Image (cartoon, rainbow, N blue to C red):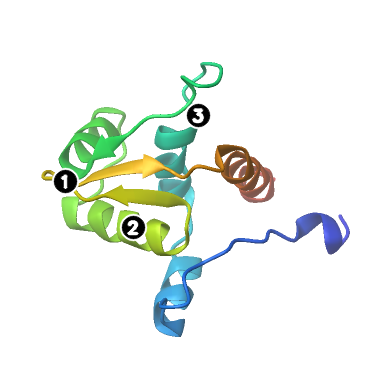
Amino acid sequence: MSNESSLIAVPFQETIQPAELNSFITHFDITTIRILQKFYKNGMTFPGDTNCYYVQQLHAELNREGLKIELETVRKRLELLVKMKMLDKVDTYPRIYAPVRNVESVQKIISRIQEILLK
């Protein structure tokens, strides 16, 4: 695999702190991919290929699927994914997280990361 083929460009907000970015990269694991998959990959075709979740709903669904994760951990990962511009946060109560407008680019990022991690 060449260096060029393993490069993944992810835009992020300028307000993200280096420590947060380092933490995100360190903790970018199968759990983060599963969270992103819940938003972007549900087996349907566009426009029904994305989902929105609120924190407790996503937490319950991940636990039901056997991924044991604390509610606060889900909340923190969602907030960091918003800062990385991989999700949007809707200002409602309860707080709803939604796929970004440029769905195709995020789906490509998720697929590429899966290829890298699952090799």
Q: Is residue 47 above or below residue 93?
A: above
Q: Residues within 10 Å of mark 1 (few under 14, many from 20)?
A: few
Q: Which mark is residue 54?
A: none
* Foreground residue among 59 and 65: 59
Q: Nearer the viewer, mark 2 or mark 1?
A: 1
**Residue flagged by tag 1: what amino acid is it?**
Thr
The furthest residue to the right = 2
Residue pointed to by mark 1: 92
Compared across the picture, whether 95 is left or right of 83 comes to left
Label whose residue precedes the other's in the sequence (3 or 2): 3
The furthest residue to the bottom = 18
Q: Residues within 10 Å of mark 2 (few under 14, many from 20)?
A: some
Residue appearing at x 41%, y 36% in the figure: 39
Residue 82: horizontal and vertical position, in percent?
38, 57
**Residue flagged by tag 3: what amino acid is it?**
Lys
Label whose residue precedes the other's in the sequence (2 or 1): 2
What SS does tag 2 mark?
A: helix
Q: Quadrant of the N terminus?
A: bottom right
What SS does tag 3 mark?
A: loop
Q: Quadrant of the C terminus?
A: top right
Q: Which mark is residue 41?
A: 3
Residue 11: horizontal and vertical position, in percent?
57, 63
Q: Which mark is residue 77?
A: 2
Q: Is residue 28 above or below residue 113?
A: below
Residue 31: horizontal and vertical position, in percent?
40, 48
For the residues labelled 3 and 1, the Cα–Cα distance comes to 24 Å
What SS does tag 1 mark?
A: loop
